[in-house]
Amino acid sequence: MCFGDIEVDKNWGDRAPPETEEQRKARILLQLKIEERKKAEEERQRKLATGLFKPPTPEEEEKKLLEDKEDDARIANWQRICKPKPPIKQMLHQTSIHDFLLSLDRMAEYDRMSYELQLITFDNWQAEDKILLKLGRSYF
């Protein structure tokens, strides 16, 4: 239902497309992996500071390098997926705030008249009356 003629201007505007499910999953996995690496580095630094750090064997070192390489590839892939899509053009229906506020006033009047004519049943106008009182207006 429309309350008066609200003029709208149609213009094209740039809008960011919504995040896809794949992007959301990649973003979460990327955050988890970064946190995991950060915690591992903090643990390593803590062990180094306390003298509890045991140098890895060559096999362990090789295994760690291979795992890090795989992790780096995963991280690069997740970062590629997470990259935001370019903005897309969309038709926008724009109106002035003045027309919008007039429409809201007309809707409020319509609600009150519908209630008085017993077309709708609503008996809790206190909140609306408080707002109108603060605005220095009252419903007639």
Image (spheres, rainbow, N blue to C red):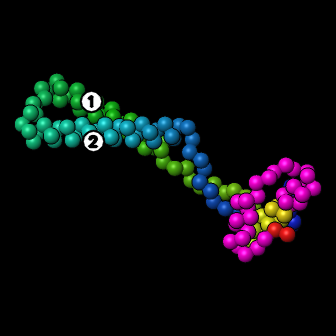
Residue 64 pos. (x, y %): 23, 30
Q: Quadrant of the C terminus?
A: bottom right
Apparent side of residue 36 relative to residue 103 in the rendered image (left or right)? left
Looking at this view, name the residue that lies furthest to the right: 117
User: Which amino acid type corresponds to the residue marked 1 in the rendered image?
Assistant: Leu
Q: What residue is shown at x 16% (from left), y 24% (from top)?
A: 59
Neighbour class for label 1 at 10 Å: few (<14), some, many (≥20)? few
Q: Nearer the viewer, residue 132 or 80?
A: 132
Residue 47 image-quadrant placement: top left
Q: What residue is shown at x 12% (from left), y 26% (from top)?
A: 57
Give the residue at mark 1.
66
Residue 2 image-quadrant placement: bottom right
Apparent side of residue 61 relative to residue 124 in the rendered image (left or right)? left
The answer, for residue 50, to whether it is visible in the render is yes
Q: Secondary structure at mark 1?
A: helix
Residue 108's mark?
A: none
Looking at this view, name the residue that lies furthest to the top: 59
Residue 38's mark?
A: 2
User: Which amino acid type corresponds to the residue marked 2 in the rendered image?
Assistant: Lys
Residue 70 pos. (x, y %): 33, 32
Residue 4 pos. (x, y %): 87, 65
Mark positioned earlier in the residue sequence (2 or 1): 2
Q: CA distance from mark 2 to mark 1?
A: 18 Å
The answer, for residue 95, to whether it is visible in the render is no
Q: Quadrant of the N terminus?
A: bottom right
Residue 96 pos. (x, y %): 74, 70
Q: Secondary structure at mark 2?
A: helix
Assess whether residue 108 is covered by the magenta stretch: no
